[in-house]
Each structure stands twice: as structure tokens, then as C-alpha cells.
Image (spheres, rainbow, N blue to C red):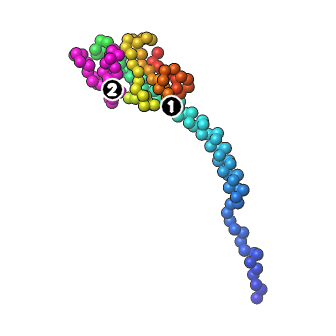
Amino acid sequence: MPQISRCSRKQQSGFTLLELLVVMVIIGLLAGYVGPKFFSQIGKSEVKTAQAQIVSLEKALDQFRLDVGRYPTTEEGLGALNSAPAGLNKWDGPYLRKGVPLDPWEHAYQYRSPGEHGDFDLFSFGKDGQPGGSDEAADIVNW
């Protein structure tokens, strides 16, 4: 009976170190290309959210004006949309379903009435929370 040699055993399955390195490099290149594009879209969505919130607050302020006959003063602020300022009999709010939202960067919206650019100015300082800026740090305004 002939003896079977151990040299004829099956080839071992698996990946070589070189194959794993090639795959890791490809994944790294894809992440390096796709990652920045993905995160830039997040920044754009925050800006669009702030713009949509400003439009919503404008509508609530317009409803306040229709009921009361004027916009809230700077001192009354946006809080006048949820609770009646003292001495206003015609207030028929609340004009927002929830409280006044913070902007997407967790800063309060700025409100001035009378405004420098219209009946009222409503704006967010953007991501940096400071006046001015560019890109994601730019101010988002209602004028």
C-alpha cells in the first residue's frame, strides 16, 4: 500500500498580508475622498435648518403682529411668542408649538425690533457664534 505524502495536502485558504494591505489602502483612499464631502454636507444641512427656523419664526412674528398690532419689542424678545407680555390684551398665542428653538449650533437667535433692515431683524451668528464670518460661520439673516 503506497503511502500518501504530506506534500499533497490542500492549500490553506486565507489572505496574505499583502492582499490585506492592498484592501486597507483602497478603503483608506475611499474614506479620504468620501469623508470630507460627507461632512461638508452636514454643515450645509445645519445652515438650511437655521434658514428654515428663521422663516418659521418670521411667520410666528407676523401672526403676533396681526393679533397685537405690532411686533414684539427687543426687550420682549422672541419669548413673547410663547407667553403674553404684560399689558397685551389682544395676545392670542402661543404662536409656536414648542419653545423658541436654538439655532443648530445651540446658540440663541438674535432679535431686534425695530430692526436696522426692516420691521425686525432676526438672525443667527452661525457656527462660530460671532458676527460676520464665512461659509458655515457666516451669519444667517432674515433680510
CB under 8 Å between callouts 2 and 1? no
Q: How many marks?
A: 2
Residue that label 2 marks:
96
Q: Is residue 95 visible?
A: no
Residue 56 position, x and y percent, is: 40, 24
Classify mark 2: helix, strand or loop: loop
Q: Is residue 93 visible?
A: yes
Quarter placement of the N terminus: bottom right
The residue at the point 67 percent across, 52 percent down is: 23
Hey, what amino acid is under mark 2? Leu
**Is residue 15 left or right of 97 when viewed as pictured?**
right
In the rendered image, the vertical position of residue 88 relative to residue 17, given as above or below: above
The residue at the point 67 percent across, 44 percent down is: 29
Q: Which residues are magenta?
A: 71-100
Which residue is situated farthest in the front direction here? 130
In the rendered image, the vertical position of residue 43 relative to residue 80, given as above or below: below
Residue 131's mark? none
Indicate yes or no whether the magenta region holds residue 75.
yes
Residue 45's mark? 1
The residue at the point 38 percent across, 11 percent down is: 114
Q: Nearer the viewer, residue 53 or 104?
A: 104
**Is residue 135 left or right of 51 when viewed as pictured?**
right
Classify mark 1: helix, strand or loop: helix
Residue 47 position, x and y percent, is: 50, 27
Q: Examine the image and state in which quarter residue 99 appears.
A: top left
Q: Examine the image and state in which quarter residue 123 appears.
A: top left
Q: Examine the image and state in which quarter residue 53 appears.
A: top left
Prevailing secondary structure class for the magenta stretch in the rendered image:
loop
In the rendered image, the vertical position of residue 8 relative to residue 77, given as above or below: below
Indicate yes or no whether the magenta region holds residue 108.
no
Hey, what amino acid is under mark 1? Ser
